[in-house]
Image: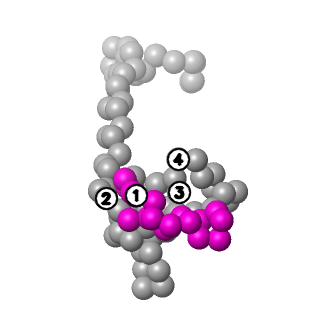
Amino acid sequence: LVDRAASDEGPAMARAPWQADDVDGVTWVDCDAAPGSFVEVGIDEVVDDYDFVATARRVVDAPAPAPRRVRALPTLAGGATVGSFGR
């Protein structure tokens, strides 16, 4: 999961599934993925015993959210909605 996109200052900052935010180290990835993207990587190196350097293999699109079902409110004659407000 990419947390911060790559910039002139360095590679993208990401987390592996076992790395908790603000607790564990980070994974530095050489890719141009946007924050929030899932990237499949290969771990190349361990840095300072807790950070990883990885090479991006592919960007995995997150699944699209399920469509929300919309319910229409029951209405009375004249278009007024049925509800307790205004009774």
For disc 4, the neighbor class at 10 Å (few under 14, some 14 to 19, many from 20) is few
- State the separation of the CA atoms marked 1 and 3: 13 Å
- State the separation of the CA atoms marked 4 and 3: 7 Å
Residue linked to disc 2: 57
- State the separation of the CA atoms marked 2 and 1: 7 Å
Q: Position of residue 80 (x, y in %)?
A: 40, 22
Disc 3, SS? loop
Which label sits in the foreground, 1 or 3?
Answer: 1
Q: Which mark is residue 17?
A: 4
- State the separation of the CA atoms marked 3 and 2: 15 Å
Assess whether mark 1 and mark 2 are in contact (beta carbons under 8 angstroms). Answer: yes
Q: Position of residue 64 (x, y in %)?
A: 32, 40
- State the separation of the CA atoms marked 4 and 1: 13 Å
Magenta region's main secondary structure? strand
Disc with the residue nearer the chain's start (4 vs 1): 4
Q: Which residues are magenta?
A: 39-55
Assess whether mark 1 and mark 4 are in contact (beta carbons under 8 angstroms). Answer: no
59 vs 4, left or right, is left
Q: Amino acid at mark 2?
A: Arg
Q: Which of 24/43 is in front? A: 43
Disc with the residue nearer the chain's start (2 vs 4): 4
Residue linked to disc 1: 42
Q: Amino acid at mark 3?
A: Arg
Disc with the residue nearer the chain's start (2 vs 1): 1
Q: Amino acid at mark 1?
A: Gly
Assess whether mark 4 and mark 2 are in contact (beta carbons under 8 angstroms). Answer: no
Residue 64 in view, yes or no: yes
Residue linked to disc 3: 15
For disc 3, the neighbor class at 10 Å (few under 14, some 14 to 19, many from 20) is many
